[in-house]
Structure formats: C-alpha cells, structure tokens
Amino acid sequence: MIHQYRNNGYNIVLDVNSGSVHVVDDIVYDILPVVEKFLAEGGMRNESGEDKENGAEKETAAERLLRFMDENASVLGEQRFSEELRFTERYSGEQLREAVEEILELKEAGMLFTDDIYEKYIADFGKRKTVVKALCLHIAHDCNLACRYCFAEEGEYHGRRALMSFEVGKKALDFLIANSGNRVNLEVDFFGGEPLMNWEVVKQLVEYGRSVEKEHNKRFRFTLTTNGVLLNDEIMEFVNREMGNVVLSIDGRKDVNDRMRPHRGGQGSYEEIVPKFRKAAKSREQMNYYVRGTYTRNNLDFAEDVKHLADLGFEQISVEPVVAGPEDDYALREEDIPALLAEYDGLALEYLKRRKEGKAFNFFHFMIDLEGGPCVAKRLSGCGSGNEYLAVTPWGDFYPCHQFVGNEEFLMGNVDEGITRPDIRDMFKNCNVYTKEKCRDCFAKFYCSGGCAANSYQFHGNINDVYDLGCQLQRKRIECAIMIKAALADGV
C-alpha cells in the first residue's frame, strides 16, 4: 500500500507498511499507479506462480511491466493521461526502463509496496499484559474560566464541583505503582478544571511521589495543564523544578482567545495570561512546554493564531481543531474542510520560511519521526486510554480518559477497589487500527493510530469507529509534516 501526493513542489511517495518515504521525479510519480495495478494483478510472478528472484527474471518482469504500462496509461480514476496518450509517447523508452528498474529495486529492498506484517499478530496483541503507565489526575473539578467549548462543562464534568484530596491522590499514585509492572518511568498529569485551584494538593502529591520513587524503582514524570490565571513566580519555580512538561492554554489572537476563553463574568483572559506565559516559556528556556490552543469555526484562519503565538516569542506551539457537535455554532463543518486544508498547507510554508529566517518554532502536529517513531503497540492502538492510561476523578473513580469522565457507562473502578470493570479495559485494549474498518485502507493509520476513541464515541457511539472530519485534517497534517521533512533534507 502506497500513498502519493504533491506538496510544495515535491512528489512524495509513502510506503505505508514500512514507513519509507521517497521524494521522486515526475516519471516515477506518474507511473507508480500503473506499477501498483501491475503488482496487484500478479505481474511479478512467472507462469508457475513463483516470485521472480534472479537478475534475468527481474529483467523479464521489467519488460513485462513496460508492456503493461503501455496498455494501461490511464488507470485508477485519477486519469492523469487521456486514453489516447501512452506513457511511451510522454517518456522515452530508456527513461521508462530506468524508472521501472528503480521502482522494482525499491520493492526488493523492502521500501516500496511492502506487505503488512502487523495484522497477523493482532490477536496476540490483544492478549498482552495490562500495564498502567500514566494517570490523568483530575485534581480540580472546578475552573475560574468559562470556556465555551469546554467538554468538561466549565470544569464540572457533568457533575458536582470538587477538589481532589491528598488521600485520594496518594491512593491513585499507589495504584499506579502497583499496576505498572516492571515499567520504571511513569507519567502523571495534573488536570482540571483548573489544577492551580488545588495547588497545595498538587505539591503534596509531587512530594509524595518523589519520596517513594527509590523504594519502588520508579521515576515519576509530572506534567501540568493550566489556563494561567493563578500562575505566579512561586508556582512557576516549583513547576520548573518538578514538572517534565507544562501545557499553557491560550487560543491565539486576543479577540479569538477572549471570545472562547472568558471569565465567568464575561471578561477576557488574554491580557492577564500572556505576560505570565511568556515569562514561563523563557524560564523553561523554551523547552518542555506548549502553548496549546483550540481553533473553531470562528477562526478558520487559525494559522494566523499560530503565527501570532510565534510572534509573541513562543517556540513550542499546538493549535488543534475543536471537537463539537452540530448543535454548537462554533463547531467545524464539512464545508469548512477545503479552507482548513489550505490553511495547513500555508502554515507549513510559513513554518519553513521562519526556520530559514532564524525564527523557528515547533508546531506539534508537524513533528513526525520518520526513522524510529513510536513502538508497534502505540502505532496500532494509540494513546492507551482505558488500559495503559486512566483518568482519576476528585473522589477516586477511574475512567478510560478525561473525555469519558462523567459518563457512568465507562466507570471502570476506583482507587479503593481497583479496576472493577475489566470488560471496559479489555474493550479499549482490543481497539486498534484493524478493528476500525475506516482505518484499514488509510495511509495515516500508523501515524494517528486510529484516532481518538472518545471522539469516535461522541459521534458514532462506538470507540471502534472514527471521527471523520478529524481524519481529514489529520491526513493533511501528516502530508504537511512529511513535506517539511523533505524540504529540510533538501536544505530548504
């Protein structure tokens, strides 16, 4: 399975199963659909059905492919050439031969048209031992802002306002230690609502975690997500000392941010948080943080918000699409897709331009590892919600992730009894790119790992489906990220 596309002057070919990326010339790009059809019809096999291996037979395969190509100049719906125009009229015989040999060599090297080696192991994949690696501690079900798109209903998560006690948080950390197997590195995110509304308990839990690391041969990586309203120098000093990452919530330009992220009284939050966030980013030497925004139908030109954040001096930026139902006036719609795809293309060019000018910034969705990448389990099943990663409410209930909190159908247990609904855990554990029909033939499946289970459930009532609009945006982001890699390798 391959995916080919043109972006910013580059002819890019992704071999989906191996992850190999190729920047090719026009002739290779043009004939690849015909080669794919040739291979699908068994063109690389001799009359007895055996694979051709030695040089002479490979040459025969190349000759047969050239003839096949001449007979199938327009294929696969895209109709790059008219029925009357054969490849032999567009390119010389020698050009075609060289291109065909290049493609077949890449195939033999396991870099093009490779087989899927993962699907046959998927049954064993579901039997893997459950090891909890991370917790999202809902330290506060309360918030001092009233963000319009908040899935947590202004921090309340479909229920009462509450602050987590130290005792509940301690039990959660003990549960994580006890259920993490031999894993040494564990992650704990302090989340809300607004976690700084329960800051003393945050500090106590960090101190407790540090006190038991050596005893249990564990290392905690604590992170924090905050709207910044309560942020001050004392808090930031502690965060810089103890937190591996901090997420600073801001949507971009002042009018955009204040429209969606106001105080409960309606006044905006931009003016009070920007100075604090700039100071925080500088204090962390522009590393191990993100300013994280959400774009909506109110700012389809979200690239301007990314540029605005970069102009403010932030070097680690994430601005992501809102996930909302059709009843919300700010929800993204199918008709918005063309504009959003163009916006990502423009942002990718701006990203490259600023790097060249010495004004580089990182954009979360353009950061992609083409060499190592995530482990197989993560490529197949994503974030690990519901089995490797759990959310914990202020009163100690377990849910698959923060977006399921408050939905009693997904209540998995609590810090006192542990996991009481292993069936929910197993359902999430067996959710992967092969249980989702829409993922099977998608080139992005090993990058997005099947997308967000919570978004799938919100729109389809099933974690084994996908959020279709989000998929279209994800595919474009991956294409842009790969193009950026190609441009940087090209010295742009």
Image (cartoon, rainbow, N blue to C red):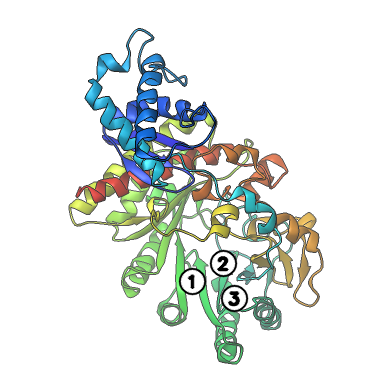
Is 6 displayed left or right of 473 in the figure?
A: left
Residue 219, how many percent across, how many down?
53, 82
- Badge 3 crowding class, 10 Å Cα cut-off, few under 14, some 14 to 19, many 20 or more, is some
Residue that extends furthest to the left in the rendered view of this protein: 357
Q: Which mark is residue 230?
A: 1
- The reply to whether dot 3 and dot 1 touch (C-beta < 8 Å) is no
Mark 2–mark 1 distance (CA, rounded to whole Å): 9 Å
For the residue pair 162 and 240, the one nearer the viewer reads as 240
| Badge 2 amino acid | Glu
Mark 3–mark 1 distance (CA, rounded to whole Å): 11 Å
Q: Which residue occupies 69% across, 47% down?
A: 463
Which residue is under mark 3? 198
For residue 132, say whether it is visible.
yes
- The reply to whether dot 2 and dot 1 touch (C-beta < 8 Å) is yes
Element on which disc 1 rests: loop
For residue 7, say whether it is visible.
no
Is 167 displayed left or right of 50 in the figure?
A: right
Q: Does residue 30 lie above or below 126 as drawn?
A: above
- Badge 1 crowding class, 10 Å Cα cut-off, few under 14, some 14 to 19, many 20 or more, is some
Which residue is under mark 2? 194
Element on which disc 2 rests: loop
| Badge 3 amino acid | Asn
